[in-house]
Amino acid sequence: MEKTYLHVDLDAFFASVEQLDHIEYRGKPVIIGGLPGDRRAVVSTASYEARKYGVHSAMPLSLAVQLCPDAIFIRGNYKRYHEKSEQVMAVFANYSPCVIQISVDEAFLDITGTERLFGPAEELAKKLKEEVKSKTGLTVSVGIAGTMYVAKIASGFKKPDGLTYVQAGQEENFMLSLPLEKLWGAGTKTLQHLRSAGFTSIKDIHAKSEKLLQSIFGKATGSFLYDSVRGGQSISFGEEAKSRSISSERTFEFDLTDRLAIDMALMELSTLVMYRMHKEEVRSCTVALKIRYEDFTTVTIQETSDFPVSSTDDMFERCKNLFNKKWDSSRGIRLLGAGCYNLQNKNIPIQGNLFENNNSKKAKVEEAIYKLEEKHPELKIRKALLF
């Protein structure tokens, strides 16, 4: 049976949650990542109103202030974003037994064989969009295709609140109809390399053999280019998912090259993972990191310590240490992922240090804040992402 995938992407997610929670923000430019005057901050997410001014993720906040001085600037409430993400993912589970969540704001649904329950794929997508809107107040954009890769590209076609359906068997023709800059996974440097090598369209890439592309661009990039322009049949997402793990990852609109922007992203991922760890009352001694570069090569690294991850700060430091061991600063970063593996119930006793250290104190404060917010959702206790 031919596969059918939905890729669902929450529209300007962090900013949309803030606009949902604050009526006065609606219709106005909202920028998540810091406040004007924060010396070391970068944009995490910008609302569509802010994007009209040229503001985008990974941009230094100081530049965003210059481009859109009248925007509403927010440091971010990542626990709240995770709560809304869980609500949306719960809706997805109503439409498929196979939901592959690849980040806090996007997921794939394998809807193969669901026609008897929900009707044709496009009808299912419309129902899903309506249910997400009615239950969470948020909008999503959906792409439908026979491959994950094309479904992901299609979901970005009519943002926000979009729906694009690539009929079965038309994935390759769909790719050939796109301009070169729509080739997802090809970062700025890869696009420059393509153009300098004489490739001006996706059709130009399609006309070349895999061996030739590998000889020009390297094995990983060459294979990716060859597969992607044919519909990405062999390109999958979420294959690194492991049982008994909690993870989060993020694909960036622009390649990350600045260390401050990278650290900002690592802090976001650490915050999202740790809030979920607190909620599920689990712990882990194993932290893993994934880096996907602009040429689509992916490296992973994990490390197990003698003591569990204790707090968001602890998780962040471990992620930075792992990152430093694998980072190739000559290449832009398209995706970062972080997670904790080999989870166990946090109530199981472990041998501790003789004296309480600073991390354990931070962990207790963090857990106390989490439990307080669980009982009183109206409270907004936030961690500023400044480092």
Image (cartoon, rainbow, N blue to C red):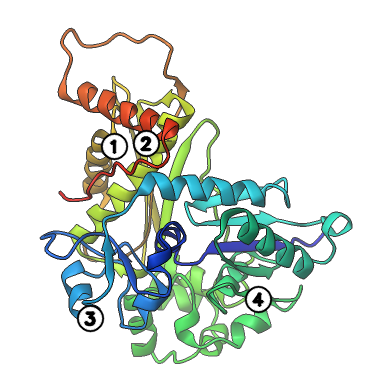
Mark identifier at residue 312: 1
First-in-chain label (4 vs 2): 4
Please give the label number shown on residue 164: 4
Residues at marks 1 and 2 touching, judged by CB atoms closer than 8 Å:
yes
Across and down, in percent, residue 90 comes to 62, 46
**What residue type is disc 1 on?**
Thr
Amino acid bearing label 2: Met
In this rendering, the answer to whether 371 lies above or below 196 is above
* Secondary structure of residue under mark 2: helix
Residue picked out by circle 3 = 67
Query: How far separated are the C-alphas under marks 4 and 1?
Result: 38 Å
Mark whose residue sits in front, 3 or 2: 3
Element type at mark 3: helix
**Quick one: label 4, few (<14), some, or many (20+) residues within 10 Å?**
many
Q: Earlier in the sequence, mark 3 or mark 4?
A: 3
Please, what secondary structure does the residue beneath circle 4 have? strand
**Residue, x 44% and y 89% (percent of image)?**
199
Disc ID at residue 274 = 2
Quadrant assignment, res 195: bottom left
- Whether residue 379 is situated above or below residue 220 in the rendered picture: above
**Sequence-earlier tag: 1 or 2:** 2
Residue 234 can be seen in this image: no
Residue 364 image position (x, y, % from top left): 28, 23
The reply to whether the C-beta atoms of the residues labelled 4 and 1 are less than 8 Å apart is no
Side (left or right) of 98 relative to 208: right
Q: Position of residue 363 (x, y in %)?
A: 27, 26
Which residue type carries mark 4? Answer: Thr
